[in-house]
Amino acid sequence: MEKIQMKVPLVEMDGDEMTRVLWKMIKEELLLPFVDLKTEYYDLGLLHRNETEDQVTVDAALAAKRLGVAVKCATITPNEQRMQEYPQLTKMWPSPNGTIRAILDGTVFRVPIKVDSIPPVVHRWEKPITIARHAHGDIYRCVDARTEHRCTAKLLFENESATKSVTIQQVEGPAIWMGMYNTEQSIRSFADACFSYAIDTRQDLWFATKDTIAKQYDGAFKRIFEEEYRTRYEEQFKALGITYFYTLIDDAATRVIRSRGGFIWACKNYDGDVMSDMISAAFGSLAMMTSVLVSPDGTMEYEAAHGTVTRHYYRYLQGEETSTNPLATLFAWTGALRKRGQLDQILELEEFAEDLEQCALDTLRSGIVTKDLVELSENKSCTAVTSA
Ligand code: NAP
Ligand code: MG
C-alpha cells in the first residue's frame, strides 16, 4: 500500500509517563506504516519543559495557532510531590493546558467514545453527548465573604468619570455574600466556538441558562448566543439541517435524560463542571472520553480527557504488565488527522482516520478490551489484554 501523503503538518505535542509510551506505540504501529506523517514536533514532557523554561509550551501553542490543528499527549502538571520526584525541576511549572488555553482562547469540548457493547447508564442515549464548557469567570473567579452583623451590601462600579452603586440586600444577622463576573467578549468567543464546532461536527447545539432569574447575567449569555446565531451562523445551520436550541437549564436537564443523544450541550462554567463529570460517568469511563480545544479562530487541539496514568507507568517501569486503555489517545490522533484531511482536502486521510476508529471499536466489540472496560462491557466473554 502506498502511504497517504499529507500536505500541511500537524502540531504534535508529546507528553509524559504512560501516555507517552502509548503515544509512541500508536505512531509507530498504527500511523507511520500507512501515513507519510508530517508533524511539527514539540516535546512537552516535563523535563523538556523544564530545560526550555516552559518556552516549548508557548512555542507549541503558537505553532497550533499558525498551522490550525494540533494533537496533544497528556502531560504532568507539577505539584509538591513532583518537585521531589524530579529534583532537577527549577520551578513548579504551570499546567501546559492552562498555558495553551490562554494563548488559543478556547472552549473545551468533551466527547465520549461510544461502543455498543458498553451501554451508557441511560439506555436511551444512542449517540454521544458532547459537553462544551465555558471555562472563564463566574464562581471560579468570584469574591465571597461572610458578615456577622446587621448590614447592607452594595455593588459599586467605578471608573475615572463615574461611580454607580446597586444595593444587593440589607440583612439583620450573619450572612454570606458572593461577587462574580464575566466579560461579553469571553461569552462571545464561547458562543462562536460552540457554533463553529456544531457546524464542523454537524450536530445540533443546545444552550441553557437561568435567564428568568438572573435577567442581566444569564440574560447576557442568552442574548449574545442569539446575536451570534442570527448574524453569523443561522444560514449555515439551515443549510446543514442542524438546529440551535435554547432553553432553561432545568428544562435542559430533563430533556437531556430523555434524549437520544447526538448533540452538543453548551454549558456555563459551573454547569459544565458538574454536567461534564455526570455525562462522562454515565457514558462509562474517562479512558473513553476525548477532549478538543476549539479557539474562535478555528484552531483545534485534540487530546485525551484523562491524565498520564501515573499508577500504570510506575508498574510499567518495574517491568510489570499494564492494561492501559489507548482509545482516547488514539482518537485524539484520528480527530486531528481527520481535521487535517478536511482542511487540505485529502479524502484518503479522512477515510483512514475513520477506518482506524472503526477498527479500534470493532476490536472492543469483539471482546478484546483493556481492564477498565471489562466490568463495563455487556459482552461477558471479553478478555483483558495488556498494553504492550
Ligand atoms: P489519570 O492519569 O487520569 O489517572 C487516574 C486513574 O484513572 C488511573 O490511575 C486509572 O485507574 C484510570 N485511568 C485513567 N486513564 C486511563 C486509561 N487510559 N486506561 C486505564 N485506566 C485509566 O489522573 P491522575 O492519576 O490524577 O493524574 C496523573 C497525572 O496526569 C498528573 O501528573 C496530572 O497532572 C496529569 N493530568 C494531565 C492531564 C492532561 O494533560 N490533560 C489531565 C489530567 C491529569 P486505575 O489506576 O484504577 O487503573
Ligand atoms: Mg468537575
Image (spheres, rainbow, N blue to C red):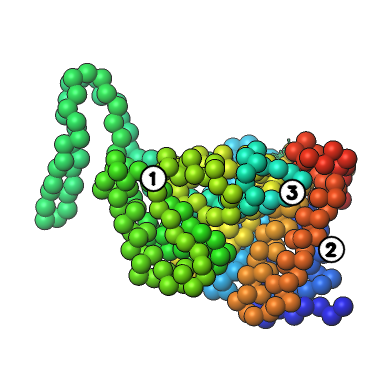
In this rendered view, identify the residue nearer to me: 31 or 221: 221
Residue 116 numbered tag: 3
Residue 140 numbered tag: none
Residue 86 appears left or right of 356 = left
Q: Residue at x 75, y 80 (%)?
A: 5
Distance Cα–Cα, label 3 vs label 2: 26 Å
- Amino acid type shown at disc 2: Glu
The residue to which callout 2 is attached is 29
Helix or strand or loop: what does disc 1 sit on?
A: strand
Helix or strand or loop: what does disc 3 sit on?
A: loop
Q: Is residue 65 visible?
A: no
Q: Residue at x 20, y 35 (%)?
A: 168
The residue to which callout 1 is attached is 248
- Residue 69 at x, y percent in the picture: 60, 69
Residue 358 appears left or right of 163 = right
Mark 3 crowd level (few <14, some 14–19, many ≥20, 10 Å Cα)? some
In the rendered structure, which disc, 1 or 2, sits on the residue that comes first in sequence? 2
Residue 308 drawn above or below residue 359: above
Ligand 2 contact, mark 1 (Cβ < 8 Å): no
Residue 21 appears left or right of 150 = right
Quarter of the picture containing the N terminus is bottom right
In the rendered structure, which disc, 3 or 2, sits on the residue that comes first in sequence? 2
In this rendered view, identify the residue nearer to me: 43 or 106: 106
- Residue 60 at x, y percent in the picture: 58, 65
In this rendered view, identify the residue nearer to me: 362 or 150: 362
- Amino acid type shown at disc 1: Leu
